[in-house]
Image (cartoon, grey):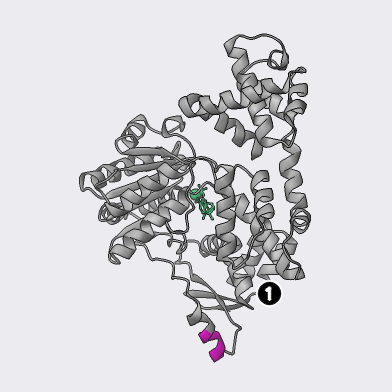
Amino acid sequence: SLWQRCLDRLGRDLSEQELNTWIRPLQVVESRHRLRLLAPNRFVRDWVRDQFLTLIEDAVGELSGDSQAPQVNLEVGSAGVRPRRQKAEESSDQRPKAAEVVIGSRLVADHTFENFVEGKSNQLARAAARQVAENPGQAYNPLFIYGGVGLGKTHLMHAVGNRLLEQNPRARIAYVHSERFVGDMVKALQHNTINDFKRLYRGLDALMIDDIQFFAGKERSQEEFFHTFNALLEGQQQVILTCDRYPKEVNGLEERLKSRFGWGLTVAIEPPELETSVAILFRKAAQDGVDLPDEVAFFIAQRIRSNVRELEGALRRVIANSRFTGQPITLDFTKEALRDLLALHEKLVTIDNIQKTVANYYKMGIKDLLGKRRSRSITRPRQVAMALSKELTNHSLPEIGEEFGGRDHTTVLHACRKVKELRESDARINDDYQNLLRTLTS
Ligand code: ADP
Ligand code: MG
């Protein structure tokens, strides 16, 4: 059966334990157009939805080849009997249904502005997205959001889409991953339906293309996209794009596209500050009906710095463990639950590692970094490395000073202040710092 093949396929990406715990217990009802997955309870359903649904959908899509893939439905229930109780459960489920789009994937219903925690790191991107949602085609066109993985780009895009559909349920909206766009276009070329493809895209009210770095090197797709893009801008139809880096830095992307991206607004989204991470954890925990102790939130947030998705993953793991074992979420419980995960994160971030990474980044020797020379080109990286050591490790100022060629703790303190000040006034230094932070923590 399709599901059987799907299980085989999932076996490539998931561990045996994950398969046994979450996937195999699902009951399956297959028909040509629908694959119903029945979870024994809401908890399993939510977990499978959040962790594995995309994988499952992708596998089903792939295995269906050219024919229309059946729709995957994940619900609470059991096969054969469709008891009343289950219906009641379904209808008491207040979660909004995923919004339909004209082309591409559905929008995740809870990727809304309300569920997006604002912080300094994402303020600008959020505000811009909000503007676009309120004034599509008028505010900024295109809106271009860039930043590292797991920082909320896709969430914001869906938030715009959800809002547009809320305001006008008949709005014609497309949300497509750039790989899907390329794939669809190739198919259209093969089947001689490229004109339909064009018409479909050009008739949209809003087009959202995610992760456009995958356009790199795909010339024909870029060409097609370029024309679609121009047509949409001319018609004042909204275009929103995301990318994992600044557009100019994507190799293999045509210059004319890059320059056109700059016609609207380009905003960065950065790794969250500690406070934002903590706020996100509280928000997600509350959504799950869990009361998270402060010290636990800070503990997790301090250790996972560069990626909100991983932050969420860690929290989910803690909550799941607590539900399974019936133990309360305390600091010790959390440390235990995340032990292997944190080992991964902590092993990397030592002062030694920071020094090597910084020296490497600024193309200088460790000797100079730790030495006595005081020219600007050396003191800056040195200060950056000290500030990173303070931010990323639990070492005290005197300990850090010691590791930096036996410097005094006041020197370290001064470095931290200086770097903070520079990051606020000098975008270049801030970029460097963010890059280093990302390299060191991901
Ligand atoms: P990206 O597309 O940048 O890789 P996503 O949008 O997929 O990242 O975000 C990863 C996860 O983190 C999602 O579950 C998203 O809801 C969550 N997330 C990211 N930023 C925030 C935020 N500021 N508030 C709440 N959730 C967030
Ligand atoms: Mg994304």
- Residue 96: % across, % down: 44, 70
The N terminus, quarter of image? bottom right
- Residue 42: % across, % down: 60, 75
- What residue appears at the point 68 percent right and 22 percent down from the top-left corner? 410
Q: Is residue 404 left or right of residue 89?
A: right
Picture quadrant of residue 163: bottom left
Q: Secondary structure at mark 1?
A: loop
Report whether residue 108 is seen. Answer: yes
Towards the viewer: 185 or 286: 286
What stretch of residues is rendered in magenta?
82-88
Q: In the displayed structure, would residue 125 be above or below residue 67?
A: above
- What residue appears at the point 34 percent right and 37 percent down from the top-left corner? 261
Query: Which kind of residue does numbered mark 1 sit on?
Result: Pro
Picture quadrant of residue 271: top right
Q: Which residue is mark 1?
A: 25
Picture quadrant of residue 200: bottom left
Towards the viewer: 107 or 213: 107
